[in-house]
Image: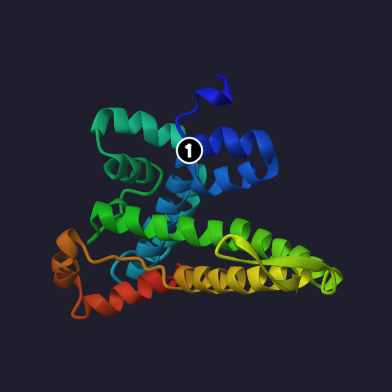
Amino acid sequence: MSIFANLSPLDHRYQASDPELWRELSSILSEEGYIRYQMQVESALVQALEDRGICPAGAAAQVKAACGRITPEDVRREEEKTRHNIRALVNCIQREVDESVRPFIHLSATSADIMDTARALQLREAVTKCILPRLKEFMAVLINLAETTAHTPAVGRTHGQHGVPITFGFAVAEYISRLGGRLQELVRARDNLRGKLAGAVGAYNASSLLLADPIEFEREALSLLGV
């Protein structure tokens, strides 16, 4: 299929103009990447349950190994039966682990817990591995340009007209300052990404039946993912 038949304009824009960036973004932001991050969340949940002594020892290792074997195609085929993406994922994981472990997969969670937390992981990874490094490289180029043109005369403009003289390096330095501010805001936004494991409607009802401190349990599970 032609890249120009893709639904997202990002696909043909980046695939054609910057194949390396497209491959990096695709591995993170694609549906395949999304499913991989969903499995990370399911694995972290079981690990937290095991840490609390709620599920059998070794359950988390089984789930992690199972997630390494499951492919997006497996999940898609299962979703054709379930008509539900997370139910399909859970079914796929359960088939790959011992019967004693199966009841603890997705225990106390709701679909939005898995999807929203996985999306946060996706965005964090894309910003950290793809966007920030390239922005920093671009800023380094601009800084060099500002330094080498620090004394190059240029026209300062006001109201769309020529104003007082400036240097080109000064204009570039002003742009660098604004871009640097946006970079800092991007880092703050990335570091503020949050996950959730609060169950249906975010009310902790299911986890409250298992634990006396469901909110602390949520923190423990999410800390395994760095969110």
Image coords of residue 88 (percent x, y): 31, 39
Residue toward you, 145 or 204: 145
Number of residues whose C-alpha sits closer than 10 Å to that of mark 1, classed few (under 14), some (14–19) or many (20 or more)? some
State left or right for residue 131 relative to residue 94.
Answer: right
The residue drawn where x is 36% and y is 76% is: 220
The residue labelled by disc 1 is 71
Q: Quadrant of residue 74?
A: top left
Residue toward you, 22 or 108: 22
Q: Residue furthest top?
A: 1
The residue drawn where x is 57% and y is 26% is: 3
Residue toward you, 80 or 149: 149
SS category of the residue bearing label 1: loop
Q: Is residue 146 above or below residue 17?
A: below
Q: Quadrant of residue 54?
A: bottom left
Q: Quadrant of residue 217?
A: bottom left
The residue drawn where x is 57% and y is 47% is: 25
Q: Quadrant of the C terminus?
A: bottom left
Image coords of residue 93 (percent x, y): 38, 45
Check the image and tell me how it is coloured. Answer: rainbow
State left or right for residue 15 relative to residue 93.
Answer: right
Q: Is residue 26 above or below residue 111?
A: above
Q: Quadrant of the N terminus?
A: top right
Q: Is residue 219 visible?
A: yes
Q: Is residue 54 above or below residue 27?
A: below
Image coords of residue 110 (percent x, y): 23, 56
State left or right for residue 90 relative to residue 22.
Answer: left
Q: Amino acid at mark 1?
A: Thr
The residue drawn where x is 39% and y is 48% is: 97
Q: Is residue 51 visible?
A: no
Image coords of residue 148 (percent x, y): 86, 69
